Amino acid sequence: MDAIEARDVTRVFRNRSSTVKALDSVTFSVRWGEIFGLLGPNGSGKTTLVKILTTLLYPTEGQAFVAGHDVVKEADLVRPRINLVSGGETPGYGILTARENLWFFSQLYGLPKRVAEERIDELISELQMEEYRDTLMSHLSTGYKQRLNLARGFVNDPDVLFLDEPTLGLDVLSARLLRGIVSRWAKEGEERAVLLTTHYMYEAEEMCDRVGILSRGRLLAVDSPERLKRSVAHKTSVKVELRGAEGGLEWLGSVKGVEGFTHREAEGSTSLRVVLSGEEYLADLLSVFRARNMSVASFSKAEPTLEDVYVAYVGGGVPTE
């Protein structure tokens, strides 16, 4: 019995004027003791899938199981064994303190008083929130609100934890703290599992045992980060520092040999990672930049990363953090 199993899960949204297939026959599993990452652009179906697995949304077709229980037919058996943390989500009630919010959620799960108090104190300590335990939630910074959000996710000591972009908008130190806590928690017991959705490639590469790439509702690949990187080793990855690209880069996806690219905008320049079908297209790529009066500040080949895997499967131009 796996921690999570999805069998041909499909979800269709309909209204009077349109039909959208958010998920299309998605099949995968998450093993016990595993952190499974789900990568995909906005609108790929990640959050829809998480909502189905956490009993918040019915699938249109297919079946899903969490901890061995059908998420539709046995939702009442699934819910006590899971928890869900979403990035940017309000972690409770503004008129309650951090500790009062955790106490409130512990009682929703029916924790005995002594167990709840011990667990809350442990979580406040581990998330380095001692100074803010009696601070109203509404007065916490974004980073500490998300620490409280993660503490809420752990308060019932779930078997399966769902994290939907949990470090979205966090500073580097807060994000690193949260990643470390989740990684340690997942490895402390064989009967635990984590499903993580993220836009941050380095986060998935650092934390995840296996990764699934979702695009337009379809699961395109599932494997370990290392195996996925080896799958694109025959392609050519290039790092480019570009000036003069303020007009946009939509055209780059149609250049011969370009399978996809990611870009980060900085003041006065654009950092690109481009995946090419082969080395023979390197000179052509440079020529295209020059023809468009763009200045190439640096240009170098790079070892494949999970970001390159993502680009090779999803294609197009993907802005990244």
Image: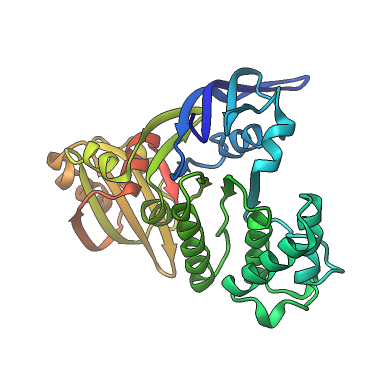
In x, y percent, where is residue 83?
A: 65, 47
Q: Quadrant of residue 136?
A: bottom right
Q: Nearer the viewer, residue 69 or 59?
A: 69
Residue under the point 70% across and 56% down: 89
Q: Quadrant of residue 183?
A: bottom left
User: Measured along the vertical axis of the image, is residue 85 above or below residue 14?
Assistant: below
Q: Residue furthest right?
A: 95
Residue under the point 51% across and 63% down: 181
Q: Residue furthest left?
A: 280
In x, y percent, where is residue 299?
A: 21, 59
In x, y percent, where is residue 199?
A: 48, 50
In x, y percent, where is residue 219?
A: 45, 29
Q: Nearer the viewer, residue 114 or 94?
A: 114
The answer to whether any part of residue 247 appears in the image is no
User: Measured along the vertical axis of the image, is residue 112 above or below residue 33?
Assistant: below
**190 left or right of 116?**
left
Q: Residue furthest bottom?
A: 131
Q: How is the image coloured?
A: rainbow
**269 left or right of 73?**
left
